[in-house]
Image (tube, rainbow, N blue to C red):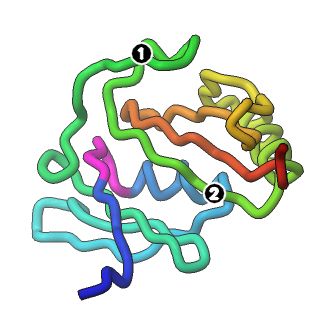
Amino acid sequence: MPIQNVTPILNVSSVIESQTWFEKLGWRAGFQWDNGDGVGFGSVCSDKAEIFLCVGAQGARGTVMPKFPGDDQTDGVWMSWWLDNPAEVDALHATAMALGMTVTYPPTDEPWGVREFHLRHPDGHMFRISAGLGSHD
């Protein structure tokens, strides 16, 4: 039984505020579900990628496990976003910086063959934004 897709669920303090945060980075708001107490579940989309956002339930925020300098305040989910090329990593980093978002690790060419930077969501989730550097010997 092959898996067709995986959709992560992030625990957030506000679906609407999180959708707005993601939209600044080029994502688009997906659905919003209001169970009568306000919007408690929703999503953001980028091409074929989708992330669910849940207030106060699924996708709990976890414990601190820093692996990189500057990432010591992260208590949420870690997720990798893969872009087509290193120039897109730099462009998204520039956008995040211009918007005053929290970048915890600057764009760096890593020895494992990717260029990446780390971006912290307001609820503590960490996104490793990466692209391959091409072939390496």
Question: What residue would you read off at disc 1?
Answer: 73
Foreground of the two, 100 or 82:
82
From the viewer's perspective, is 118 left or right of 133?
Answer: left
Highlighted magenta segment, given as a residue range:
10-15
Marks 2 and 1, how far apart in space?
Answer: 23 Å
Q: Is residue 13 magenta?
A: yes
The relative height of residue 98 versus residue 67 in the rendered view (above or below) is: below
- Is the N terminus in the top left, top right, bottom left or bottom right quadrant? bottom left
Q: Label 2: how many residues lie within 10 Å, few (<14), some (14-19) or many (20+)?
A: some
Residue 72 point in image, percent of width and height = 44, 13
According to the picture, the residue beneath numbered tag 2 turns out to be 82
Q: Residue at x 68, y 37 (%)?
A: 112
Is 74 or 25 nearer to us in this picture?
74
Helix, strand or loop at mark 1: loop
Which mark sits nearer the N-terminus, 2 or 1? Answer: 1
- 89 within the magenta span: no
Q: Is residue 1 above or below residue 99?
A: below
Q: Are marks 2 and 1 in contact (CB under 8 Å)?
A: no
Q: Amino acid at mark 2?
A: Trp
